Amino acid sequence: MANSTDLIRNVAIAGHGGTGKTTLLEHLLFQGGAIAKPETIESGRTVSDYGDEEIARKISIHASLSHVAYKDLKINFLDTPGSSDFVGDVILAFRACEAALVLVDAKAGVQIETIKLWRNLDGRKKPRLVFVSKLDEERASFDGALADVKGKFKVNPVAITIPMGEAASFRGVIDVLNNVAYSAPASHDQREAPGPVPADMAAAVAECRSKLFEAAAEGDDGLMEKYLGEGELSQEETLKGLKEAFAAGRVFPAFAGSALRNSGTAALLDFIASIAPNPAFLAPEPVFEHEGQLSSVTVDPSKPAAALVIKTQIDQFSGRLSYVKVFTGKLAPDLELINVRDGRKEKLGKVYTLQGKKLEEVKELVAGDIGVLAKAMDLKTNDTISAFDKPFFFHKLRLPTPVHTLAIAAVNKKEEDKLNENLVKAAEEDLTFQVTFNIETKETVIAGTGELQINMILERIKAATKIQAETRVPRVAYRETITKKASAEYTHKKQTGGHGQYAKVVFDVEPVERGAGYKFDNKLFGQSVSKGFIPGIEKGIRQAMEMGVVAGYPVVDVKTSITDGKEHPVDSSEMAFKIASRGAFREATKNAAPVLLEPIMNLKVFVEEKNLGDVMSDLSGRRGRISGQNPLGGGIVEIDAQAPQAELLRYAIDLRSMTSGTGSFEVDFDHYSPITGKIADDVVKAAAAFRVHVEEEE
């Protein structure tokens, strides 16, 4: 197999769920001779959907790596999930590959997840191919699908292959670029073979070849001049023009076919081998040097080794697997590198390429290749490993912020530690899944991109450990503050034999601007309280602030001024003043019209235009404030809003229900805002009930 950067092609296969990505990959591998027989999704034996959950649910959950040796090339494919719950694995595939193959259903056209993925690819300036799938199904339309692509993405897809018939009359495809026809095999486990173009398709092929010449000439003055003068280009000129235009993102090649019938794969594989860019063709990869300066690195096999860990997988048989994209040099067994994250040395063991779940040992992974390091126990996703004298680190994967959160606990408290260990392990494998312990609410909180993702992780843990876990909506981290100035004094006096305890303090408290936190002002004059007791006074105030007077939440945005006090020459101590300060602060806060504050979140909601009214109405019902709408193209609208966190705890589930699974959103904290009335009363009652629950458990 090719072991040179210029002989490598990396392609991510992406698209809406159900468009046939895994089936297409299976037949690409078969057509290229990588496997002896293509399997169906129903059989549970496809190369890329090999996990128990994927087999049971018949969907892709993880990005899987496979390859085919074709025309002296090594073509790596990363098959990606179609559900938005597993978008993290799509992003790692886009980061690792130089081109993307986007599937579009011939009947449904461009669907919501395809629109999101296309936008992501736009942001990365990645070249992409379009494969119109399922052309043998009822109501399929190649022209209709391409018109949808053109309308939603404002691009002009150029047909490299066209169908011979559609729906029930579908009988294969014509490779316009090479002017040959491929009749659909009689059986899906037969390979395509080229033949002459049918006479009744000659006119259609001539028209498409003309558009192909025009696309190839785009951006090259010499080719354009020849095309305008002669009306056509040679095969060599056409390939050269397409290669340059495709890599630059000026041309979007389109292919027709039926993956299940292994129709359309031969021409697609040929095009990828001939036209798709090799890794060295790409623009320099931005990196950060250790001093924080931004620099860049080109894919170059002649430089010292450097690679990015794009994925971590913990396999019950093979152990810890680290998927890497090599950018410079080569990785080989016994090579000693630096893990730039912590400066530790990492001596490599065996290196592998993958065919789905099958590890295939190789002598080396060269610059541009994607492979696997086994049992590298200290490596984590996003780590940079490097042999450079002055190591740099690659940008981390641009992963979405988790939006669906749950509090979780083991039913059997003795199993709590084991449950947390397994949750942390799951978070290592999937960085869009996070586990944190909220000290304030005393809850372990898990967060992910959707309900399906979290449910599957919990099911996997239960199946492996038999641990029963219970989940609930997490508690909101409210705050308390004051709304007016007030004063209080407090005397702590205790006589227990021997030295007693005595301290008196007088406080003023007043509100400060939102977000200011806490301010302390020492207004003592004279020697009423010694300077040595001031640290104790501040500690007492801070302790009191941790447990407010309305519902027991932390107090924020308050200024405390000590105006007077009294000490005893024998019985006063730092502890006594700390206790007195706690009491004075609580009394002053009670007199300062305290209120509850709730967290307000910034919200970006992405929905189809047909769901816009329902979603905006729902946001208003959640006490949301809508600040604007932004059409993104492709029938997608971004809604910008703010809403209380308490109203968004189940929003991932509710939005999916409202939009039939097509909507998505991003959320982040903005500020705290006061609440009063029934909403505040309900929070106070819930806080009291929670304290009783905690006391009973203790």
Image (cartoon, rainbow, N blue to C red):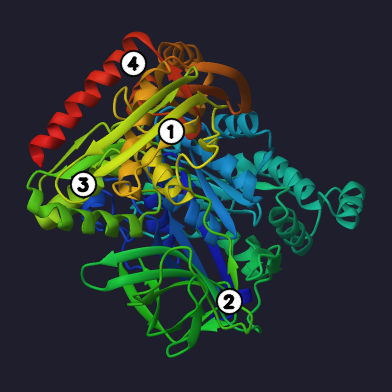
- On the picture, is 691 further left or further right than 381? left
543 w.r.t. 387: above or below: above
Residue sitting nearer the eye, 144 or 493: 493
- Ranked by sequence position, the earlier of labels 4 and 2 is 2
- Ranked by sequence position, the earlier of labels 1 and 2 is 1
Find numbered disc 2 in the image and state the secondary structure of the residue it sits on. loop
**Where is mark 3, residue-wise?**
458
- Ranked by sequence position, the earlier of labels 1 and 3 is 1
Q: Residues within 10 Å of mark 2 (few under 14, many from 20)?
A: many
Q: Nearer the viewer, mark 1 or mark 2?
A: 2
Name which residue lies at 76% across and 47% down: 215
Q: Are marks 1 and 2 in contact (CB under 8 Å)?
A: no
Q: Are marks 4 and 2 in contact (CB under 8 Å)?
A: no
Q: Residues within 10 Å of mark 4 (few under 14, many from 20)?
A: some
Q: Nearer the viewer, mark 4 or mark 3?
A: 4
**Where is mark 1, residue-wise?**
167
Name which residue lies at 53% across and 18% down: 609
**Is residue 263 among the parts visible in the rendering?**
no
**Where is mark 4, residue-wise?**
680
Find numbered disc 4 in the image and state the secondary structure of the residue it sits on. helix
- Ranked by sequence position, the earlier of labels 4 and 3 is 3
Q: Residues within 10 Å of mark 3 (few under 14, many from 20)?
A: some
Find numbered disc 3 in the image and state the secondary structure of the residue it sits on. helix
Name which residue lies at 57% across and 72% down: 368
Q: Position of residue 25 (x, y in %)?
A: 41, 56
Q: Nearer the viewer, mark 4 or mark 2?
A: 4
Name which residue lies at 79% across and 46% down: 214
673 w.r.t. 382: above or below: above
Residue sitting nearer the eye, 671 or 554: 554
